[in-house]
Image (cartoon, rainbow, N blue to C red):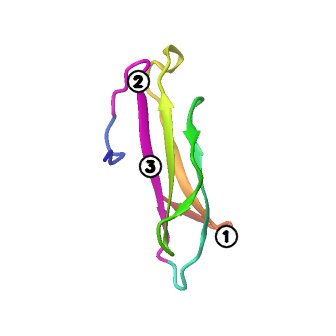
Amino acid sequence: MYDGVSCLPIQVGETFTGQLFGATNCTPPTTIAEIATVSFPGMNFGRLVPINSQVYSRNFNWTATFDHLGYQVMCALAIDRFLSLIFI
């Protein structure tokens, strides 16, 4: 599992597949409505899936092209049903 702490090299034509997790420790638990991203072109995202009442996930994949040479950065955050941000 990629921990998001360091850089991960991807070659042109290679597909990177990952999973984003959003968790809330709110009391009472709140529903995560979305895991939003700021990402680069070509990212494909699956639907938001509840793992349990406090953890949700979203799969994603991306195939590197020559247009993506260099560093690519993706940021993600979870948004609850009250539109509050939960940083992940």
Q: Position of residue 8 (x, y in %)?
A: 33, 33
* Front position among marks 3 and 1: 3
* Front position among marks 1 and 2: 2
What residue would you read off at disc 3?
19
Residue at screen point 56% across, 35% down = 43
Q: Residues within 10 Å of mark 3 (few under 14, many from 20)?
A: few
Which mark, residue 36? none
Compared to residue 69, the image places residue 61 above or below, namely below
Q: Is residue 31 magenta?
A: no
Residue at screen point 49% across, 14% down = 66
What amino acid does circle 3 point to?
Gln
What residue would you read off at disc 1?
81
Q: Between 33 and 72, which is closer to the camera in this rendering?
A: 33
Q: Is residue 19 magenta?
A: yes
Position of residue 19 in the picture relative to residue 6 (left or right): right
Q: Which residues are magenta?
A: 8-25
Q: Secondary structure at mark 1?
A: loop
Q: Secondary structure at mark 3?
A: strand
Q: Quadrant of residue 85?
A: bottom right
What amino acid does circle 2 point to?
Glu
